[in-house]
Amino acid sequence: MSGQQPGRDGSPQVFQPLAGDDPTTIAGYRLAAKLGAGGMGKVYLSYTPGGRPVAIKVIRPEFGEDAEFRRRFTQEVQSAQRVQGLFTAPVIDADTNAAQPWLATAYVPGPSLADAVVEHGALPVDAVLLLIAGMAEALHVIHGAGIVHRDLKPSNVLLAADGPRVIDFGIAYAADATSLTGSGVTIGTPSFMAPEQAAGRRVTPATDIFALGQVAAYACTGAPAFGEGTSHGVLYRIVHEEPDLSGIPERLTELVTRCLAKDPEARPSVAEVIALCQAANAETVLRRPEDWLPAPVAADITVRAAAPAPVQTPPPPPSSAPTVAAYSPTAPVAPATPPPGYGPPQPQQPYPTPPPAATPSPAHAQAHHYAPTQFPAQPPRVPQPQGPQQPYPGWPGHPAAQPPRSQSRRGAIAVVAAVVVAVGGVVAYSALKENQQQTQGSGSSQGKDKSGGGASGDAKPGAKADPTPTEHKGINLTAGYHLTLGDDDVRPQQGEDGGYELSYDTGAYLDAETSDGNMVLLDPGQEGSLATCRAETRFAKNIYLNKISKGRQICVTTGTGHMGLVTVQGFSPEGSPSKYLTLDVTVWRNAIGSRSGS
């Protein structure tokens, strides 16, 4: 699903206008044009508030309905966010929880390799060497982020004036093995698969090296190395037969032959691929971006780069074309015009007061927070409002909310107030007030949750005292292990993805496993305490290790009502046989009350 190039219809128009079934905005991004479509969805052109073009890829609704796809897509987008290479199109924003998941990448004003070869023919050897060397550098950073591309093909390589750009890395993994792969939806291009991929065996970085060899063969001959035809026929040849390399130039023969080895172990590494390019041509480094491509292809890039920007769509009226917005069952629809920054509004904006209703509207129970280069695995959550006409505590201009009282209690107070006014029953009023305070001090677990975990963190008269913290020093939490904060002896236990309270996932991130659990990464210098952890609402379900350094602290809230403060004391040394974090953990048990009983 490259999508960053228009269809070839002979028209000089670079951008495709939006059709009637296309959305006009996506999570605050106003759309300007359609760039293309693929097996997984459509791609649109939009702009940041600063005027930088971005390509927004909206996944097909069928995939969004598949739970396994959504889980994998979230994991891969989080990993892709860490890829910052010179020859990749970086992911700058995304919402994997939307009704139609989407992600935004930097827009590249150039044709794909597939389009360039179809329009202008095979590339000369020097250009192919520069192409493969750049793609190898892209794979180096992609694999370094723990991603296997799985769908490296000419349409996923864009040609820019200063070198190639590899896009859509990791997305094929999300679609692989979902319920849709057996329903007529084809993911990936058979002509560029590796033997182990075609046979359903384990996929590794060597799988991408095989695809790199196929891309090289295509670029210099204009045809796939294993021919074309039906999917089954092509896949059979990839697994059981040798490629047709008769048209490969001599300088590229060793490179292509080694990359197309059937045995993954026999294929060269990324570093070896670059060395093979250097051996074939001393000018393999992209030092002359103005002339690394043939003149017709370079002219195509110039035309695209100079094309006038299409007019962005105005904010749609309520009954206009459909709008794809950041989805949450309890989040408000994002505005049509993006605020400063990328995409959806920041949660510090005043929260709108919902209209009067008999019951609270679920559309006002949580808010999104998206940053241009950070993405939360889950939308951050904020405390539930107390009623349909009451704003959130802590929002600008609104006082902190008071604990809710039942209708019967409000009625009783109203009656007593009337008595006080009519007869001056001061003694009766004082007695009721005292009784009310005593009742609040020994209320239900829900009442304790509201007072103990509120935004202010202030103790109420008669409230239960804060729990005594327990300290657990020097815990070495190995990847694939978890902690349960409610245990008397908090120590690592094997397993992840099993509903635990805190795990070190093998994907290189800390995970708040329970459904009601969350984490907050405190800012450097921010005091780590129970009051701070109660007040903070910058929630995340997982935090990647590249966001953490020694000394950083993380607040952990569990679904069973415990709170913890995790202090990172160190990381496993490079030569260690296992990956682990050294943590100090402070636990306040039953600090917010059990959510399961509320």
Image: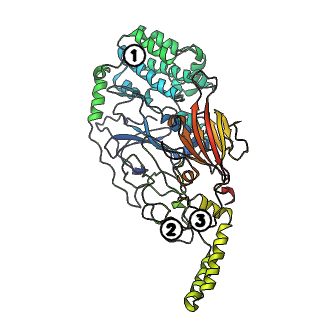
Residue 113 drawn at (x, y percent): 40, 26
Outermost residue toward the right in this view: 488
Q: Name the colour scheme.
A: rainbow
* Sequence-first tag of 3 and 1: 1
Per the image, the residue denoted by label 1 is: 129
Q: Is residue 173 positioned above or below 427 on the image?
A: above
For disc 1, the neighbor class at 10 Å (few under 14, some 14 to 19, many from 20) is: many
Q: Which mark is residue 337?
A: none
Q: CA distance from mark 3 to mark 2?
A: 20 Å
Foreground residue among 442 and 500: 442
Q: Pick whichever of labels 3 and 2 is earlier in the sequence.
A: 2
Is 385 on the left or on the right of 253, as rendered? Answer: right
Residue receiving disc 3: 460
Residue depicted at x 53% and y 59%: 456
- Res 491 quadrant in image: top right
Pick whichever, 314 or 573, lies toward us.
573
Is residue 215 toward the left or the right of residue 598 in the image?
A: left
Residue 92 in sight from this viewpoint: yes
Q: CA distance from mark 3 to mark 1?
A: 71 Å
Q: Is residue 222 visible?
A: no
Residue visible at 40% across and 17% down in the picture: 220
Q: Identify the secondary structure beneath mark 2.
A: loop
Q: Mark 1, mark 2: which one is toward the viewer? A: 2
Q: Along the line of sight, which residue is nearer the eye, 370 or 243?
A: 370
**Residue 170 drawn at (x, y percent):** 52, 32
Amino acid type, mark 2: Gln
State the mark number for residue 390: 2
The image quadrant where one finds the C terminus is bottom right
Tell me the element at label 3.
Answer: loop
